[in-house]
Amino acid sequence: MDSGISIALLGCGVVGSGVMKILKDNQNLIEGKLGFPLHVKRIMVRNLSKARPNYIPADILTDDLSTIEDDDDIKIVCELMGGVSPARDYILRLIRAGKHIVTANKEVLAKHGPELLREAAGNGVSLRFEGSVAGGIPIIKPLAECLAANRITQLMGIINGTTNYILTKMSSEGREFAEVLSEAQEMGYAERDPSADVDGQDAAYKLAILTSIAFGIEARPEDIYTEGIRGITSLDLSYARELGFAVKLLAIAKEYEGKVQARVHPALIPLNHPLASVAGVYNAVFVQGNAVGQLMFYGRGAGSLPTASAVMADLMEAADSIARARPVSALAPMVKRWNGTSCLSRIDEVVTRYYIHLLVIDRPGVLAAIARSFGNAEVSLESVIQKGRGKEPVGLVFVTHRVRERNVQQALEEIRQLPVVVKVANVIRVEGEEA
Ligand SMILES: NC(=O)c1ccc[n+]([C@@H]2O[C@H](COP(=O)([O-])OP(=O)(O)OC[C@H]3O[C@@H](n4cnc5c(N)ncnc54)[C@H](OP(=O)(O)O)[C@@H]3O)[C@@H](O)[C@H]2O)c1
């Protein structure tokens, strides 16, 4: 093994070039820890003539997978292309060719993780994916291994940097979503097509992976209730702050009434909750285990070097396992657990508190009529504040006690019919009060 282990990359974009940079800058450190060098033998890209950083050797670039698949010398392949097609097929082919896989691809894992893990186990190779959730923050391995003896009772994360950046800016500068989004696009913090981020899909892919590991169930992204941040206004953010809350796009997985809830949506969290102070593009995951108590993982959830840091850790672990001829699949137990059926509860079964913002005609008896509708659906109110007295329509902001979502929906159905109600401006769940 002194001569080292040969590896290949599929993709040399933001993350792939970060991996190459770490391999160059920390070469001695990596070799010192492993006791042997890692050689990048091939890098597969789409466009061979694209300009690349000078630490990417042009002579190892290829656009032909078979030069990697058929090379028995290559033991580990890092898939850093993204998307499902052709990534899924390539990963399957490489697993069948006996390569260990490292990937940062949340979409392929969220949609095809069980299949890929089964295939890896069946072929005696490992599939590692620390970089797929929350970039540089170690979270997969802590959940799968360091917290293995815990029953995880809840997990709550800010795992999309783009939406956290937008909400942070909207809140601190009193600006609206569309304006902050277009500024984020200009600065490169948001994609030209921002929908995967702002509509919550990216966070749902990551939550599917985290939920499957933390709760040992198969959480499919299509079963995760997903709501983005397009409907959040600067007014809601300022009302929430007045009430003592920050608004964050949260990815939540919780055990409740014998089921697991997995959902992505904007939520009010108390300003003294550890997640409330996570600002800008930073990510954090708050975890509660029945033995360890509360933990918070915080750091850079994306970016070239932070994500490559996670990929490199997986790569070094895979290389170390090969060198020691150890059973390689540290995450193998998940394969069995991922085969379970989805048992996620439906959103209308969720029990939490709610922030409800109504626009109403300012007339005597309005409050009593609305309170009656809440009462009819057994929704009990904790507080109400009136906003913009003298203007029409006026804002009424209610915060409920803990109640089942189904009851809130029933109350809102009735409230929408009231002649004095102009609009249900927003309904946002309140989370994190048990922390
Ligand atoms: N960027 C982040 O901060 C971040 C964070 C966490 C996880 N991730 C995940 O990491 C993965 C890579 O993301 P990225 O941001 O590095 O993407 P990227 O910058 O778009 O790079 C993609 C790379 O894959 C290559 N590629 C794409 N399709 C290909 C194909 N069909 N055949 C061969 N090569 C192909 C591209 O080749 P060319 O260079 O020739 O175009 C490029 O080098 C994704 O799964 C992403 O979700 C990214």
Image: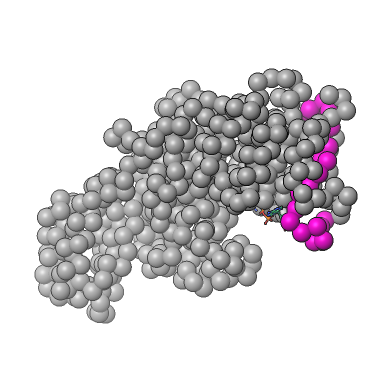
Is residue 33 shown in magenta? yes
Percent position of residue 368, x then y: 12, 64
Give the percent coordinates (x, y) of residue 123.
64, 28
> Quarter holding the N terminus?
top right
Whole-percent x and y of residue 192? 59, 67
Q: Is residue 314 visible?
A: no
Residue 153, quarter of the rendered image:
top left
Q: Nearer the viewer, residue 261 or 420?
A: 261
Residue 48 in view:
yes
Q: Residue at x 47, y 33 (%)?
A: 338
Q: Which residues are magenta?
A: 32-53
**Position in image of residue 144 (x %, y %):** 54, 30
Query: Is residue 24 covered in magenta?
Result: no
Determine whether 413 is above or below 90 in the image: below
| Residue at the limit of the structure toward the bottom, as seen here | 391
Lateral position of residue 85 relative to residue 266, left or right: right
